[in-house]
Image: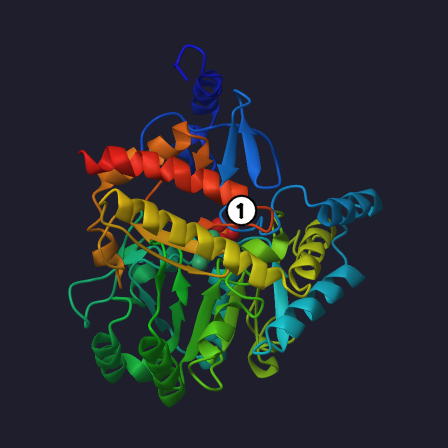
Amino acid sequence: MTSSTDLNLPLFERAKAVIPGGVNSPVRAFKAVGGTPRFVKRAQGAYFWDANDQRFIDYIGSWGPMILGHGHPAVLEAVQKAAVEGFSFGAPTEREVELAEEILSLVPSMEMVRLVSSGTEAGMSAIRLARGATGRSKFIKFEGCYHGHADALLVKAGSGLATFGNATSAGVPAEVVQHTLVLEYNNVAQLEEAFALHGKELACVMIEPIAGNMNLVRASVPFMRRCRELCTEYGALLVLDEVMTGFRVALGSAQSVYARNIPGFKPDITVLGKVIGGGMPLAAFGGPRAIMEHLAPLGAVYQAGTLSGNPVATACGLATLREIRKPGFFDALSATTRSLVDGLAAAAAAEGVPFSADCEGGMFGFFLLPALPQNYAQVLKTDSTRFNTLFHGLLDRGVYIAPALYEAGFVSGAHTASDIEATVTAAREVFKILSKE
Ligand SMILES: *Cc1c(COP(=O)(O)O)cnc(C)c1O
């Protein structure tokens, strides 16, 4: 598509005049990969169409929520019906109770849940709850994990375990991140050292169990087991941020995947988002009754929201969860995702391109690296120029993956075997180009 006929270009110019960077969330701007973002006109099933009416096979799915694909008839019907009944009341509804019951029935570590509107809000509230419930201020997070953009979470590691984090964003005062300790993902020895130094002052450890914000890097079983054991030993809470993995990697979320290898494994607080809204602004956090009862109006930890439990969003989330819990949904989704990852690996191998990939349920990640990275520093070893060649090569061939190498990918129930085949064929052509560079 030459720039003179690319209808995305004038839209991007207009957008940049009125919205900072032309986008309402930074990664959409294509800053890492260069070029013009595709402005989406409409979407259906596994595809969306841009301003040029070019069709793309969508492997972002709104960064995870669209697990059924776009415009699923049951979800559409539920949303249309809810919209007619009313957009928002600021008073309780039966549907909020239904969604809460649905979530709790699928994630047994949670006895109560509070609904909010974004993953950021849920993550921020979970930290406040952990601090309020333990009466402690400090907490641990891991380099490369993203938990939303609350001030205390925009932190990178300080120099050594005694020094706490440094803010990664302007506008975040040093005092606000002074209680955030940032550690290396999958580093058991460092985790043990940090607990030995600060364990009695820690409110919680917050972690993405299968991290999807440094591409895809899963916490090793020994690492997750040690997180659980140390939290229990020192009276800190284990907060699993399942905003991305919740109802995406398995019906029971990532915690059910770890429970297969760690008997009785449970987090103290679970943070959810993305899939539970089915594409509408909806997120949640929950845990055992004794912890959740610290929240207002029962307890002293304040948390509120004008649009929390929104009737249209809850209708969308509920309809989505009811579809994915149907027998066979996750088996089929996992098989589709696996066939994509295997197909890409075979295509890369055929062209002699170093490649590694991983997937769980409907979430995948791949790297132009010979072996799967275990932490953020290893993810950073990816050659970004080669990634950009891959990204634009796929985009030109109608395949839309995340426009940054730090992002996971998503397959939906609407992706067919022929979508996967077309994607692998496109990828092989681009791998051929990469093999000659
Ligand atoms: C997307 C995401 C968030 C933030 O959710 P928003 O709805 O974008 O605020 C938090 N944690 C994780 C793991 C996420 O993937």
* Residue 144 placement (x, y as % from top left): 31, 57
User: Residue at point 70% right, 61% down?
Assistant: 322
> For the view shown, which residue lies furthest in the right direction?
85
* Residue 416 placement (x, y as % from top left): 56, 46
Q: Secondary structure at mark 1?
A: helix
Quadrant housing residue 96 = bottom right
Other-residue count near label 1 (Cα within 10 Å), few / some / many at <14 / 14–19 / ≥20 = few
Q: Is residue 92 visible?
A: no
Q: With 63 as the anchor, is 308 left or right in this view?
A: right
* Frontmost residue, 432 versus 184: 432
* Residue 415 placement (x, y as % from top left): 56, 46
User: Residue at point 28% right, 34% down?
Assistant: 389
User: Height in image: 267 above or below 348?
Assistant: below
User: Residue at point 41% right, 68% down?
Assistant: 209
Quadrant where the N terminus sits is top left
* Frontmost residue, 398 versus 48: 398
Q: Is residue 178 visible?
A: yes
> For the view shown, which residue lies furthest in the bottom direction?
233
Quadrant where the C terminus sits is top left
Quadrant housing residue 433 = top left
* Frontmost residue, 367 versus 436: 436
> For the view shown, which residue lies furthest in the top direction?
4
Q: With 35 as the anchor, is 118 left or right in this view?
A: right
* Residue 202 placement (x, y as % from top left): 35, 78
- At label 1, the amino acid type is Ala
User: Height in image: 208 above or below 388?
Assistant: below
Q: Is mark 1 within 8 Å of ligand 1?
A: no
* Frontmost residue, 230 versus 256: 256
The residue that disc 1 covers is 417
